[in-house]
Image (spheres, rainbow, N blue to C red):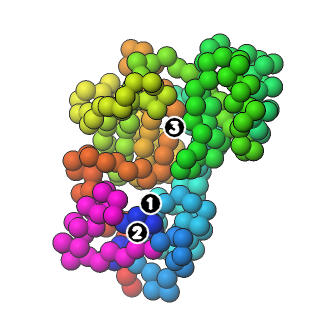
């Protein structure tokens, strides 16, 4: 079997470990760097899309047009890059997703929040998810005005800040397998910390919620950022297509198995 990786970084720990398992079992792994590669004339049996740039999505679409499966699909990956669309899809499906408001610019954001002041702090994010995007907590009107004055010319989304102990639950799925970790929130002033969490330590409904997210968004490899809103009530604040899933025993094995399960049969 031939498995393709659409990524600029095949040495990423999850990909490298899955590659070792696949090649050790006699399969061939091929890498397409989306910055320079074209859709191959002789494609692999399946591709893993571990990149979310416009060029990577365009490459994945070309491969899909030839009838070759891509995990995750280009459409599902692209949908998760738009935080407005993500929130709309999640709330429409009844998921416990943080209500999200969208503004065309930092100036529009400041005017909108001045007209309808939030009940407390807000979290402002770039509408379009990407490496190095904006994720910031703003507590006062002065901070909102300062942010608007220096904000880059792009759309933003706003979520009301949910009180929490400063920890995010990072939940990941690779096919049917769910993994979890506790991480310091990037909005918390405390130092980073945390680590893997046994699923038995989570509220019992959370793993099923993760699978529901995958069904709603059409994802096979994905992450769900969850805050405990009190009493084990989950509040989803983000969904990510094909995250790193680092330091999770069993994750490389799950990814290798998933790739082979999706591979297109050869005529």
Q: Is residue 113 above or below residue 71?
A: above
Between residue 40 and residue 188, name the one nearer to us.
Answer: 188
Q: Residue, x 57% and y 74% (percent of image)?
A: 62
Q: Is residue 172 left or right of residue 64?
A: left
Between residue 211 and residue 154, name the one nearer to us.
Answer: 154
Q: Residue, x 29% and y 63% (percent of image)?
A: 16
Between residue 212 and residue 54, name the one nearer to us.
Answer: 54
Distance between mark 1 and mark 3 Cα atoms: 18 Å
Secondary structure of the residue carrying tag 1 is loop
Q: Is residue 237 above or below residue 244?
A: above
Dot placed on the residue nearer the N-terminal end, 1 or 3: 1
Q: Residue, x 65% and y 42% (percent of image)?
A: 127
| Residue pointed to by mark 2 | 5
Distance between mark 2 and mark 1 Cα atoms: 7 Å
Quarter of image, res 204: top left
- Answer yes or no: do the residues labelled 2 and 1 have beta carbons within 8 Å? yes
Dot placed on the residue nearer the N-terminal end, 2 or 1: 2
Q: Is residue 266 above or below residue 150?
A: below
Q: Residues within 10 Å of mark 1 (few under 14, many from 20)?
A: many
User: Residue 176 — which label?
Assistant: none
Quarter of image, res 126: top right
| Residue pointed to by mark 1 | 50
What is the magenta range?
11-32
Tell me if residue 206 can be seen: no
Task: Please identify the quadrant where the C terminus is shown.
Answer: bottom left
Secondary structure of the residue carrying tag 2 is strand
Tell me if residue 253 can be seen: yes
| Residue pointed to by mark 3 | 238
Picture coordinates of residue 205, whole percent (x, y): 36, 28
Distance between mark 3 and mark 2 Cα atoms: 25 Å
Picture coordinates of residue 75, whole percent (x, y): 58, 58
Secondary structure of the residue carrying tag 3 is strand
């Amino acid at each position: 079997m031939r498995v393709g990786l659409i990524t600029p970084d095949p040495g990423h720990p999850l990909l490298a470990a899955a590659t070792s398992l696949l090649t050790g079992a006699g399969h061939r792994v091929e890498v397409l760097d989306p910055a320079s590669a074209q859709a191959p004339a002789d494609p692999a049996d399946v591709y893993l899309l571990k990149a979310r740039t416009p060029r990577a999505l365009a490459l994945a679409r070309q491969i899909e047009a030839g009838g070759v499966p891509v995990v995750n699909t280009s459409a599902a990956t692209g949908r998760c890059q738009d935080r407005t669309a993500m929130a709309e899809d999640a709330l429409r499906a009844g998921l416990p997703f943080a209500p999200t408001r969208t503004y065309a610019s930092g100036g529009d954001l400041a005017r909108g929040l001045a007209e309808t002041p939030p009940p407390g702090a807000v979290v402002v994010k770039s509408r379009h998810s990407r490496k190095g995007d904006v994720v910031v907590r703003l507590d006062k009107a002065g901070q909102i005005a300062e942010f608007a004055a220096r904000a880059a010319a792009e759309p933003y989304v706003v979520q009301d800040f949910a009180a929490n102990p400063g920890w995010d639950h990072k939940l990941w799925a690779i096919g049917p397998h769910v993994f979890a970790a506790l991480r310091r929130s990037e909005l918390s002033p405390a130092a980073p910390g945390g680590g893997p969490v046994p699923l038995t330590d989570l509220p019992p409904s959370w793993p099923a919620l993760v699978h529901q997210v995958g069904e709603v968004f059409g994802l096979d490899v994905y992450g769900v950022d969850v805050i405990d809103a009190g009493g084990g009530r989950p509040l989803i604040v983000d969904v990510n297509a094909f995250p790193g899933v680092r330091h999770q025993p069993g994750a490389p094995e799950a990814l290798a198995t998933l790739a082979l399960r999706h591979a297109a049969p050869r005529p």
